[in-house]
Amino acid sequence: MDIQTKMIHGGISEDATTGAVNVPIYLTSTFKQDGVGKPKEYEYSRSGNPTRAALEELIADLEGGVKGFAFSSGSAGTHTVLSMFKRGDHIILGDDVYGGTFRVLDKIFRQLEIEFTLTDVTNPKAIEESIQSNTKALFLESPSNPLLKITDIEASAKIAKAHNILTIVDNTFATPYLQQPLSLGADIVLHSGTKYLGGHSDVVSGLVTTNSQELAEKIGFLQNAIGGILGPQDSWLVQRGIKTLAVRMDAHQKNAGILAEYLANQPQVAKVYYPGLADHLGYEIAKKQMNGFGGMISFDLKDESKVNQFVESLKIFTLAESLGGVESLVEVPALMTHATIPKADREKSGIKDGLIRASVGIESSQDLLNDLKQAFAAIQSEKED
Ligand SMILES: *Cc1c(COP(=O)(O)O)cnc(C)c1O
């Protein structure tokens, strides 16, 4: 079955008892038992709920996993997966992973004496050099945020496997429609379902899947023990979002391609970061491991002092954090999503003060182009005053 079909018919896609074409929202915390110690399929909704189970089976189907897990946020999913590790373990982390992933390791797991090293995972040599005798996991993101750096997942997972290290991939930016890390050798895939999977900026959620039965058992135990599960209403919303993931991603990346070309030729822009541009460092790898280049673009304004005025002049692009919804959003990483990273570290990783990140929505590409054009005109005329 093609992935477009799985998005609609995969997992559990209808209600077995009534034939309802959508899985109902099972608003129940507990389930009647047939006798003492004789539960039916479900017992208690932290351990399992039919609406959540439908979503969990769906993400496993889409990513090629054996079992899926839904959490109350992407961060809750990350926390649960990282809870597999114990004192003295070491994790290699991409140097531009999501800030919240860094934060949970830095502020919480570090206190539990779990060690980590940040490294440029786009460079296989750097991965090799970061491996220690106690390294248990390689955690990476591709494309990364906000510079859309591309890591060769297959090559990285191969190095990890040779050292008995698990590869964990945050696949939020690509979604399973564009990239399936398990098929490239990864062991665990994580998602912020808040972004493209939900797709409508109306729900916060996290999804995890793995192709190892043994890891599935560990994660399942931790999901129930820690309890950061996704509720039935939100599970339903994410499943509903996924039904249109293919058509939305096609529209996102069509628009992103058009805007990236425009920005690359715009004299007020110093640099465009989009893996679909042939001069992007990760272009060849992206072409090999992805079925498209996605809907995220970042770009540097030449005049950094105009960045606030530029984003505030936009009328269709909404100034907001987050990404992956149908509506176009922009943000300034140095002042918003990545503001907690000290300026020197930020600049070292290539995040300049004039960097703007756009989550390109599915509006008319002409309207989006016109919006960018009028904002560039606004910062231009100001200059001439
Ligand atoms: C948003 C995001 C997360 C965290 O997800 P939440 O649902 O906000 O907790 C993790 N990774 C990436 C790449 C993200 O964009």
Image: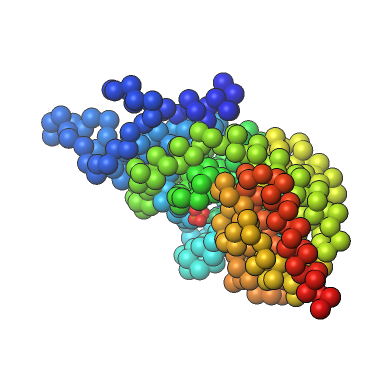
State the image coordinates of residue 271 (x, y, percent, origin top left): 82, 59
Colouring: rainbow
Residue 272 visible? The answer is: yes
Up-down relation of residue 312 to residue 2 (above or below):
below
User: Is 378 positioned to the left or the right of 210 in the image?
Assistant: right
User: Is 49 positioned to the left or the right of 337 in the image?
Assistant: left
In the image, ligand 1 is in what quadrant? bottom right
Is residue 269 or residue 152 the one in the foreground? Answer: 269
Is residue 303 or residue 316 the one in the foreground? Answer: 316
Q: Which residue corresponds to the image point at 17% horizontal and 35% vertical from the top-left?
A: 32
Q: Which residue corresponds to the image point at 52% horizontal and 30% vertical from the top-left?
A: 7
Is residue 44 or residue 28 the one in the foreground? Answer: 28
Is residue 98 or residue 312 the one in the foreground? Answer: 312
Placement of the N terminus among the 4 image quadrants: top right
Q: Which residue corresponds to the image point at 65% horizontal and 67% vertical from the top-left?
A: 312
Res. 120 image quadrant: bottom right
Res. 384 image quadrant: bottom right
State the image coordinates of residue 138 (x, y, percent, origin top left): 62, 50
Placement of the C terminus among the 4 image quadrants: bottom right
Residue 129 visible? The answer is: no
User: Is 314 positioned to the left or the right of 83 in the image?
Assistant: right
Q: Which residue corresponds to the image point at 76% horizontal and 69% vertical from the top-left?
A: 379
State the image coordinates of residue 97 (x, y, percent, origin top left): 63, 57
State the image coordinates of residue 89 (x, y, percent, origin top left): 54, 57
